[in-house]
Image: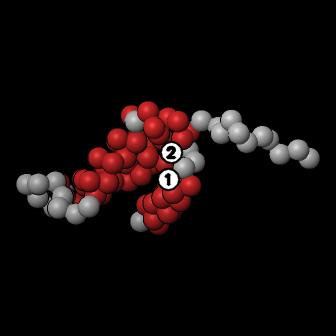
């Protein structure tokens, strides 16, 4: 349970910052897939889950294949490495 919370907080922060979008979406998507399975399918629901988890899983899947997400994972060409 704690691991899921850490993944959600860190993944959400990365998405908000636009950093490592695909990696964050992969971690969050895996967490949502487990949520759909454990709280929906294992409970015997005909519809896997009526919570927000299926929608979030779909959003993460979109981010994994989206060209826009690929652009956000590349280094910003306008930023230079720190000198020091």
Look at the numbered disc 2 and give the secondary structure of its residue: helix
Extreme residue toward the right, this view: 84
Residue ID for mark 2: 21
Q: Position of residue 72 (x, y in %)?
A: 54, 41
Reading the chain from its start, which is encountered first: label 1 or label 2? Answer: 1
* Residue located at (83% from left, 45% from top): 82
Above or below, 28 relative to 39: above
* Residue located at (7% from left, 54% from top): 46
Foreground residue among 20 and 36: 20
Above or below, 60 relative to 71: below
Please say whether residue 73 is visible from this viewpoint. Answer: yes
Q: Which mark is residue 15?
A: 1
Q: Position of residue 11 (x, y in %)?
A: 50, 55
Q: Quadrant of residue 74?
A: top right
Q: Are marks 1 and 2 in contact (CB under 8 Å)?
A: yes
Foreground residue among 60 and 35: 60
* Residue located at (22% from left, 63% from top): 51
Please say whether residue 23 is visible from this viewpoint. Answer: no
- Viewport quadrant of the N terminus: bottom left
Q: Residues within 10 Å of mark 1 (few under 14, many from 20)?
A: some
* Residue located at (48% from left, 58% from top): 12
């Amino acid at each position: 349970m704690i691991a899921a919370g850490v993944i959600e907080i860190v993944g959400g922060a990365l998405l908000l910052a636009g950093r490592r979008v695909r990696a964050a979406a992969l971690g969050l998507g895996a967490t949502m897939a487990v949520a759909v399975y454990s709280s929906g399918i294992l409970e015997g629901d005909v519809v896997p889950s009526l919570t927000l988890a299926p929608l979030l899983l779909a959003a993460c899947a979109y981010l994994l294949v989206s060209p826009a997400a690929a652009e956000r994972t590349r280094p910003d060409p306008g930023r230079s490495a720190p000198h020091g």
